[in-house]
Image (tube, helix red, strand yellow):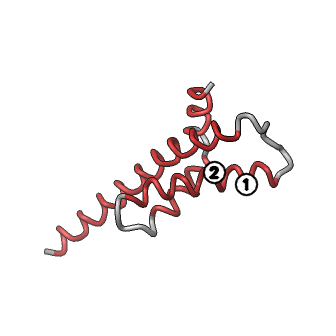
Amino acid sequence: MLMALLVAKLLDLIGFIIAGTIVLFFKSKWGIVTSGAIASIATIFIIQATGRSLPPDIIASVFFAGVIAHSIHAGIVYYIKQLFTKKKSKSEV
């Protein structure tokens, strides 16, 4: 079941946008995991706010799958940002 939740969270576009936006404000690599956790909490709150409640027995699984998946999303955005900033600094020299 955890693998199915992980695949569903990897395909979550809203979580990708949230994690990608948050990681842009961090300069260290710890921002990847931090933005993954924040995005996971935010997506759970969004689901609960829309009235679609999650069963209490799977909320922890959804959270941990979300942290892993949104950390992957944040890592992708972080390294794309690093790629562009390094190219920009090399072209200025």
Q: Nearer the viewer, residue 23 or 65?
A: 65
Residue occupied by mark 2: 14
Q: Nearer the viewer, residue 12 or 33?
A: 33
Camera-nearest residue between 6 and 14 = 6
Residue 29 x/y as whole percent: 35, 58
Which residue matches tag 1?
A: 45
Please, which residue is most extreme toward the bottom here?
Answer: 92
Q: Residue at x 52, y 42 (%)?
A: 69
- Residue 3, compared with residue 20, is above or below; it is above
Q: Residue furthest left?
A: 93
Q: Which quadrant holds the N terminus?
A: top right
Under circle 2, the secondary element is: helix
Q: Quadrant of the C terminus?
A: bottom left
Which label sits in the foreground, 2 or 1?
1
Inter-mark Cα distance, 2 to 1: 12 Å
The amino acid at mark 2 is Ile
Q: In this image, 15 relative to 49: left or right?
A: left
The residue nearer to you, when weighing 44 against 78, is 44
| Location of residue 79 (image quadrant) | bottom left
Q: Amino acid at mark 1?
A: Phe
- At horizontal 41% and vertical 50% (from top left) the residue drawn is 75
Q: Position of residue 18 (x, y in %)?
A: 58, 57
Who comes first in sequence, dot 2 or dot 1? 2
- Residue 33 x/y as whole percent: 45, 53
Viewed as shown, does residue 79 lie left or right of 48?
Answer: left
Q: Position of residue 48 (x, y in %)?
A: 79, 50
In this rendering, position of residue 7 left or right of residue 24: right
